[in-house]
Image (cartoon, rainbow, N blue to C red):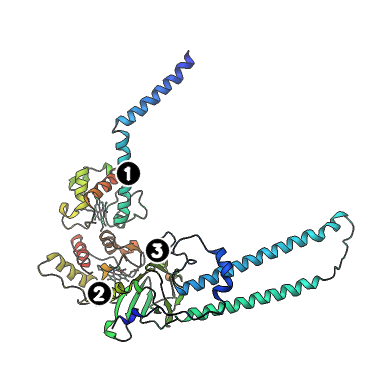
Amino acid sequence: MRRLIHPALALAACLLAFAGCSESGGDGAVSDRKDQAARGAELIAAKGCGTCHEIPGIDGATGRVGPPLDHMGDRMFIAGMIRNTAENMQVWLTDPQSVVPGNAMPDTGLEADEAEDVAAYLESLR
Amino acid sequence: MMERLWNRKPSIQAPRIVGRLALAPLLALASPAIAASEESTSAPMYYLKTFGPKGDITASLTWGLLAIAAGVSVLMSVLVIVAMFRNGRSSMATPGSPLPIAHPPGGHRWIYLGLALTTLVLIALVIWTMDVLAEIDEPAGEPAFTIEVTGQQWWWEARYVDPDDPSRSFVTANELHIPVGEPVRITLASRDVIHSFWVPALAGKTDVIPGQTNETWLQADREGVYRGQCAEYCGLQHAHMALRIFADAPEAFQAWWDHQLEPADEVPEGSELLAVGERQFRLQCGACHAVRGTLAGGEAGPDLTHLMDRTTIASVTLPNTPGHLSGWIADPQHQKPGTTMPNPDLSGPELNAIRHYLETLD
Ligand SMILES: [Cu+2]
């Protein structure tokens, strides 16, 4: 009997684990988020963020003009001005001059939905 | 008057003596499956698929020589192997006994035959090679204009010269436009060390040597973007000394030339940001960069009068986007360590103003 119980328990544990996984946001949402981050990574390369920032996971992103963007998902503030939330990040990315007038970061021409993708990638940097 | 430059019908190629005829079967064998070597594809430096008369005939020669060399290697290997197994058996049969010295008759025949065959093939190759050299020396028709290219660490200056009207000359950098299907003469000079001008999909290399003006020509038979590259090690940023050739339709090329002649637009009245940008540019950058129509007239760096017409900056090192451009201006020494362009002493607002100003240079 005992021998039978062990595999059964293991199976149940597995199922629970999977259930737990999909509970926290749903499988679809997770992969959506991943797709977004992947698109964001491509945009970051195309827009030249890496000429100014060191950004983990982006080829050639070794810039020293602005701050490094590692752990961006964990930071409290953006540019020391606004809280690091998803909406604020989109504001910063589409119009950094409105947040800190005159700062060296340009409007790189990101559309609203593109900024969302880039924000998703930065969010993933923990 | 500029129509003359490209309305000419593509001229007929002088007949070639050896050329493709003889090598047609070899070429059919060797023809690569790799697609166009235009820059849009994954192999921008691939030189065996070409897009102009000069490259085409050289690539044929390359394939031909390769095929013959491969054929000779195979033939020789086979002969050696056959020889090894033909006479070996009798001596191997009785180990320890002295080798029989045999003089089979007719051995010299092989040598005479081999010598004659080798000589014939080599003579044919010499004729073919010299024919190709003669062919690529000059284009079939006289080029309508000249681009005077000056290589320097680590970028290319290009002066377009209309032989009939000096007032229609202008200077640009790194991105050269040519009319499709037309030969264009290119002179090559250096401001510092030896470079080499190479656009693999169109033509072979021509060295760029200080104190001397070399000449070459290009012709692209298909519209597109072709990557070029300095092909002679010239210092730290040699690898970042690339160029782009745009082969444009005749009308587009004429429009481009006409546009390049125009001076920069004046900064509009009332734009504080652009006024600051223009002034800062003149103070910080104008000693090295020219913007025609303004007081900025430097010659140590690329002419920026129509910077926004270029798709890349810093010799095809970075795409020309607001982000890359800002990053380049703020820290060129990080993007291209050792470049003549120094890191500027600019505040954030000044950097922004200058970039906005540069974005008006279209
Ligand atoms: Cu070089």
Q: What number is the disc on residue A35?
A: 1
**Along the line of sight, which residue is nearer the eye, A96 or B42?**
B42
- Please state the horizontal and vertical placement of residue B45, each as a whole percent of the image: 45, 65
Mark 1: which amino acid?
Answer: Asp
- Tell me if residue B204 can be seen: no
Mark 2: which amino acid?
Answer: His
Q: Measure the alpha-carbon separation of dots 1 and 3.
A: 28 Å
Residue under pointer 3: B39
- For image coordinates 29% across by 51% down, the residue present is A68
- Tell me if residue B127 can be seen: yes
Say yes or no: labels 3 and 2 on the same chain.
yes
- For image coordinates 28% across by 57% down, the residue present is A65
Per the image, label 2 sits on a secondary structure element best described as helix
Mark 3: which amino acid?
Answer: Glu
**Quarter holding residue B337:** bottom left
Q: What number is the disc on residue B259?
A: 2
Residue lying farthest to the right in this orientation: B97
